[in-house]
Amino acid sequence: MLIPGLEAIDMGWHSILHCQDTLSITLPHLSLKGTFLAQQVSDTNVIGQMQDAFNNFIASGQVWALIIGFVIGYVVRGLTAS
């Protein structure tokens, strides 16, 4: 039995694997496995960053857009639900 869309998934993986094979042949001196492991973090105060983001969320008025969106979504759901 053939699952619809399976060909597209199979072709996608084939092209990704083909690209990786091409890179490994073309650029043998680069290691693609360890390239993205190192990063430099300048501010490690995660809780402080979350507080700043929440305060900006409140101060910019985005909280009102969120509340209005919930209310409108609830009303539309109530009108369309059977």
Image (cartoon, grey):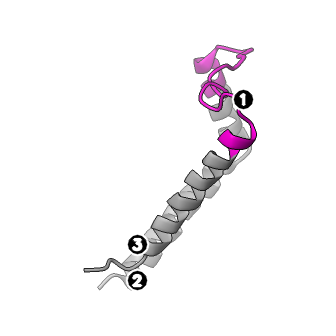
Q: Earlier along the polypeptide chain: callout 1 or callout 2?
A: 1
Instruction: Quickly name the residue at label 3.
Output: 6
**Nearer the camera: disc 1 or disc 2:** 1
Extreme-left residue of the structure: 1
Mark 1 closeness class: few <14, some 14–19, many ≥20 residues within 10 Å: few
Tell me where residue 21 appears, x and y as whole percent: 61, 47
SS state under label 2: helix
Q: Earlier along the polypeptide chain: callout 3 or callout 1?
A: 3
**Nearer the camera: disc 2 or disc 3:** 3
Residue 39 lies in magenta, yes or no? yes
SS state under label 1: loop
Amino acid, disc 3: Leu
Query: Looking at the magenta stretch, what is its main secondary structure?
Result: loop
Residue situated in front as seen by the camera: 74 or 8: 8
**Can you tell which mark lies on residue 79?**
2
Amino acid, disc 1: Leu
- Magenta region, residue range: 23-51
